[in-house]
Image (cartoon, grey):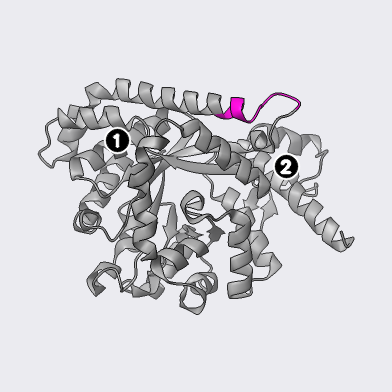
């Protein structure tokens, strides 16, 4: 099946990827630049071998507070290893792309941040240790902006331990409330799990797992009280990352069977994502093309999705939008056309103080250039 073909690939190239993190990073930012992206968040499980060793020698009684205390003495070495791996990967990427030279690849201009990737299909003690590492790393290294969970959501341990994993996140969120959380949830269908398995993953990820963004969310209408859940997501502004190629190939869900129009009608914020462009041989340009053709989305809707991808990104700084739903600029930038090359002094000062706002300004400049080109027939 497409599901098995996708998920089984990771184990086949795992040993190779550990030695080629920099190569993969270079390829990812090169492709992002080709797709006119200004910012990406990539997922990685850092210091995995060292963390596995720490878990093996740490007692586990199922109490997360006990586990937190037991793991804490080993955390400095784990965090140092994770930072070394990021340093090495970024250094190799810059060398491969010739960043800083006259022949620099366009990918050098793409801002990169990382989400610590938790492997939900492993035993509870290992999952908790990875979560803790992600929260600690996001607190101490500005390059890591949050955590996410991967592996098949329909896997045996993923399903059996789902409630326990949400309780772990609830505990860690209380310890590290400033750390951002994005969770794959609702990447399920009735062909993969029994009906009871479709009823609560998205809601629990938001209410107990404290997810600010949801990846996929395909089974939303199978959740208990779905309309109530949609209203909650719209009210809390929980963004859903829509992955058309992935949902079609893994779940067999596309077109009229996909909940994208339902989310739009409920005013839930949406953005497009690839997940996983390396395995699925997709890219963000293709995802926009599929979204436009499959659901006949207007240019205004596609533009909103592009803006949302930065508005709900975990990059540091205040948004340039005072009202993200209507994309109304903050007062300091209200007199300016968004994206202008020479903003007023007040707006320039605001942009200088916010990395997120500067990226949003870059995107607005690109959108303005694109729209001007279309108007001129170019």
Residue marked by disc 2: 332
Do the numbered discs 2 and 1 sit on residues whose CB atoms are within 8 Å?
no
Q: In the image as oriented, which residue stretches furthest toward the right?
A: 376
For the C terminus, the quadrant is bottom right
Rendered location of residue 333, percent (x, y):
74, 44
Q: In the image as oriented, which residue stretches furthest toward the bottom?
A: 256
Q: Against 193, is 366 above or below?
A: above
Residue 72 within the magenta-colored segment of the rendering: no
* Mark 2 and mark 1: Cα distance apart in space: 39 Å
Instruction: Name the dominant secondary structure of the magenta segment.
Output: loop
Q: Against 287, is 266 above or below?
A: below
In the displayed structure image, the side of residue 21 where residue 327 appears, left or right: right
Which residue occupies the foreground of this view, 54 or 34? 34
In the displayed structure image, the side of residue 21 where residue 104 appears, left or right: right
In the displayed structure image, the side of residue 326 where residue 172 appears, left or right: left
Which residue occupies the foreground of this view, 263 or 324? 263
Residue marked by disc 1: 132
Residue at horizontal 21 percent and vertical 27 percent from the top: 54
Q: Is residue 294 visible?
A: yes
Q: Is residue 316 visible?
A: no
Q: What range of the chain is rendered magenta? A: 93-102
Residue 247 lies in quadrant: bottom left
Residue at horizontal 53 percent and vertical 28 percent from the top: 90
Residue 109 lies in quadrant: top right
């Amino acid at each position: 099946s497409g599901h098995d073909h996708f998920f089984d690939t990771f184990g086949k190239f795992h040993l190779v990827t550990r030695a080629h993190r920099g190569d993969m990073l270079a390829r990812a930012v090169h492709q992002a630049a080709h797709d006119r992206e200004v910012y990406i968040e990539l997922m990685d499980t850092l210091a995995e071998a060292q963390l596995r060793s720490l878990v093996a020698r740490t007692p586990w009684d199922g109490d997360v507070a006990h586990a937190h205390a037991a793991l804490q003495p080993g955390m400095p070495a784990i965090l140092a290893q994770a930072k070394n791996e990021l340093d090495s990967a970024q250094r190799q990427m810059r060398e491969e792309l010739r960043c800083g030279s006259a022949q620099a690849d366009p990918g050098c201009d793409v801002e990169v941040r990382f989400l610590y990737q938790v492997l939900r299909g492993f035993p509870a003690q290992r999952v908790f240790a990875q979560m803790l590492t992600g929260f600690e790393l996001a607190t101490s290294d500005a390059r890591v902006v949050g955590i996410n969970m991967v592996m098949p959501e329909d896997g045996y341990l993923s399903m059996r331990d789902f409630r326990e994993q949400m309780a772990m996140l609830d505990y860690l969120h209380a310890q590290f409330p400033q750390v951002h959380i994005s969770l794959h949830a609702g990447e399920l269908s009735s062909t993969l799990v029994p009906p009871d398995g479709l009823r609560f993953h998205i809601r629990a990820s938001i209410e107990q797992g404290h997810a600010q963004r949801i990846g996929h969310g395909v089974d939303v209408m199978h959740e208990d009280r779905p309309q109530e859940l949609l209203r909650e997501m719209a009210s809390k502004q929980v963004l859903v990352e829509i992955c058309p190629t992935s949902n079609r190939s893994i779940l067999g869900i596309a077109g009229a069977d996909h909940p994208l129009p339902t989310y739009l009608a409920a005013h839930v914020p949406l953005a497009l994502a690839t997940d996983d462009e390396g395995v699925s041989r997709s890219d963000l340009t293709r995802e926009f093309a599929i979204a436009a053709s499959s659901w006949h989305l207007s240019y205004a809707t596609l533009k909103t999705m592009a803006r949302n991808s930065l508005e709900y990104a975990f990059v540091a700084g205040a948004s340039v939008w005072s009202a993200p739903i209507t994309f109304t600029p903050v007062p300091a930038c209200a007199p300016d056309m968004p994206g202008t090359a020479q903003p007023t002094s007040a707006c320039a000062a605001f942009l200088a103080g916010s990395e997120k706002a500067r990226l949003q300004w870059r995107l607005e400049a690109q959108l303005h250039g694109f729209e001007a080109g279309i108007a001129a027939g170019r």
